[in-house]
Image (tube, rainbow, N blue to C red):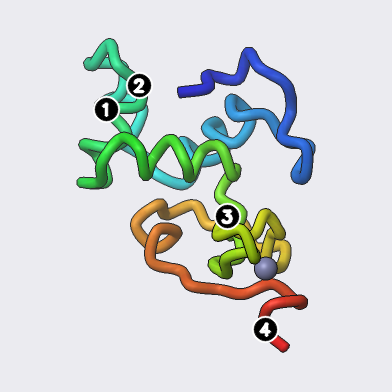
Amino acid sequence: MNDGSGPAHPRTGSTASAFLADVGNVWIGLWPSVASDGDKARAIATFFKLDTAAVSDWVSARGRVQCCARTGRQNRCLNLVGTHVEFDPRAWVQRIDLCGIHSQ
Ligand SMILES: [Zn+2]
């Protein structure tokens, strides 16, 4: 998982570490459980009862919701939907939003 040492997100401008700091302010109790586990991604996934791939995708998107549509080549649309930042990865994985192009 990107721990924030990498570049800012190309669309949100936010770094993973800044996003995770915000997440930690929302979920009191998350960091104590993460600190007791050497694997940050696994600890966050355990805290939210999700798999580590979902948590990694959520952090990569900085909690922003990505369009669920598929392109002509069957790749997932890269457009972000709205400006809402979802701080609950359990809600984030269940969102099925469409961007302005694909909702028409
Ligand atoms: Zn789209």
Q: Amino acid at mark 1?
A: Ala
Mark 4 CB lies closer than 8 A to ligand 1: yes
Q: Is residue 80 above or below residue 46?
A: below
Q: Mark 2 — residue?
A: 40
Q: Amino acid at mark 2?
A: Lys
Question: Mark 2 and mark 3: span between their CA atoms?
Answer: 29 Å
- First reached walking from the N terminus: tag 2 or tag 3: 2
Q: Position of residue 9 (x, y in %)?
A: 71, 35
Q: Position of residue 55 (x, y in %)?
A: 39, 40
**Number of other residues with Cα within 10 Å of mark 2, as a class: few under 14, some 14 to 19, many 20 or more:** some
Could you tell me if the residues under marks 2 and 3 are in contact, i.e. CB atoms within 8 Å?
no
Question: Mark 2 and mark 1: span between their CA atoms?
Answer: 5 Å
Helix, strand or loop under label 4? loop
Q: Mark 4 — residue?
A: 103
Label 4 vs label 2, nearer the camera: 4
Please give the name of the residue rendered at 48% of the width and 72% of the height, measured from the top-left corner. Answer: 96
Could you tell me if the residues under marks 2 and 1 are in contact, i.e. CB atoms within 8 Å?
yes
Q: Mark 1 — residue?
A: 43
Please give the name of the residue rendered at 57% of the width and 57% of the height, measured from the top-left corner. Answer: 76
Q: Residue furthest bottom?
A: 104
Please give the name of the residue rendered at 27% of the width and 11% of the height, measured from the top-left corner. Answer: 38
Q: Mark 3 — residue?
A: 75
Q: Position of residue 65 (x, y in %)?
A: 58, 59
